[in-house]
Image (cartoon, rainbow, N blue to C red):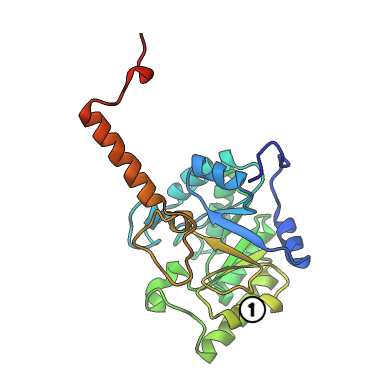
């Protein structure tokens, strides 16, 4: 693990992510929602931190991302932004903060950047209306990461959390949407829950980086939700997820030991007390 003293005290930029694709360097992305975890993720060398609206589920205990508000996103993004020294900071725009009009999208996206210190926002979808809005947001000077495939804010329209793009009409639409987002000015595109062959085709067809989650190994980068990959979210076990730790068991064991020592009078001991 590299220390913060060894790394440049400068954030990566959207242009540097594009350059990483051009030279074939994979991009590592993780979510974060608070100051302490964001600092650890940044120290470990992640290239991009996404403050995802997945916080609705993994932080607030909601059933979906739909209840998440703009105020929640700004609050968590500000905390994360204070910790980052190197990683690019991207913030999800929550449901109904960009779909109503381009003017409202520009206002809300600009507010996120002003209030949080983020460098970019992420918007879901690739149909013509969304792409037109993204173009307006980008033209206003706000970098945008796109998101195609399983778009959680459209979960009810999609019929649930499922693989997207197996049917010919879906795959053709996704490829067209990816080109549309590139033309609209997105600096990267998240591909979620796509067949790996389709994700690879999209990656080769666009000049901006693709960031996969459940989309196979041929994307330019990968993203996971931090509590999922750390084994803290025990109830979530999709096929694409690799758990890099089992912290739920560690936390449960540590807290159980603390409870036992308090009840038995072992803690605090002499070394934890003041004269």
Quadrant assignment, res 28: bottom right
Q: Give how far across and how far down residue 127 sits, in percent.
A: 56, 76
For the C terminus, the image quarter is top left
Q: Is residue 220 left or right of residue 30?
A: right
- Which of 160/234 is in front? 234
Given the current orientation, which residue lies at the most extreme top position? 275
Q: Residue at x 54, y 45 (%)?
A: 38
- Residue 255 placement, left or right of 139: left
The location of residue 170, given as percent across then percent down, is 52, 85
Which residue is farthest left? 263
Residue 234 position within the rendered picture, expressed as x and y whole percent measured from the top left: 36, 59
Residue at coordinates 38% horizontally, 64% vertically from top-left? Answer: 236
Question: Where residue 146 appears, x then y in whole percent?
Answer: 59, 66
Q: Locate residue 110 relative to residue 248 in the image: left or right.
A: right
- Could you tell me if residue 160 is visible in this image? yes
Report the front residue among 164 and 187: 164
Front-most of residues 47 and 123:
47
Query: Closest to the observer: 208 or 218?
Result: 218
Question: Badge 1 local density, few (<14 within 10 Å), some, or many (20+)?
Answer: some
- Residue 137 visible, this angle: no
Q: Quadrant of residue 203?
A: bottom right
**Dot 1: element:** helix
- Provide the residue designation for mark 1: 200
| Picture layout, residue 265 above or below residue 231 | above
Relative to 58, 76 lies left or right:
right
Give the residue drawn at x 62%, y 52%. Answer: 46
């Amino acid at each position: 693990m590299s220390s913060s003293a060894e790394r440049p005290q400068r954030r990566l930029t959207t242009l540097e992510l594009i350059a990483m694709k051009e030279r074939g360097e994979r991009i590592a992305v993780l979510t974060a929602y608070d100051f302490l975890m964001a600092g650890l993720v940044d120290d470990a060398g992640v290239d991009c931190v996404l403050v995802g609206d997945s916080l609705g589920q993994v932080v607030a205990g909601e059933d979906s991302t739909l209840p998440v508000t703009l105020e929640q996103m700004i609050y968590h993004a500000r905390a994360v932004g204070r910790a980052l020294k190197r990683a690019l900071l991207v913030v999800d725009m929550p449901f109904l903060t960009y779909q109503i009009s381009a003017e409202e999208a520009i206002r809300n996206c600009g507010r996120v950047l002003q209030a949080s210190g983020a460098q970019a926002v992420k918007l879901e979808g690739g149909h013509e209306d969304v792409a037109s809005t993204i173009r307006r947001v980008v033209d206003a000077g706000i970098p945008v990461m796109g998101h195609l495939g399983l778009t959680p804010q459209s979960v009810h329209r999609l019929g649930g959390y499922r693989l997207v793009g197996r049917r010919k009409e879906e795959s053709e639409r996704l490829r067209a949407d990816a080109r549309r987002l590139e033309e609209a000015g997105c600096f990267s595109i998240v591909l979620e829950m796509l067949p790996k062959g389709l994700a690879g085709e999209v990656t080769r067809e666009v000049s901006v980086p693709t960031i996969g989650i459940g989309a196979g190994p041929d994307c330019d980068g990968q993203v996971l939700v931090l509590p999922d990959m750390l084994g803290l979210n025990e109830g979530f076990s999709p096929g694409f997820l690799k758990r890099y730790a089992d912290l739920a068991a560690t936390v449960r064991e540590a807290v159980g030991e603390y409870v036992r020592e308090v009840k038995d009078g072992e803690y605090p001991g002499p070394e934890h007390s003041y004269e």
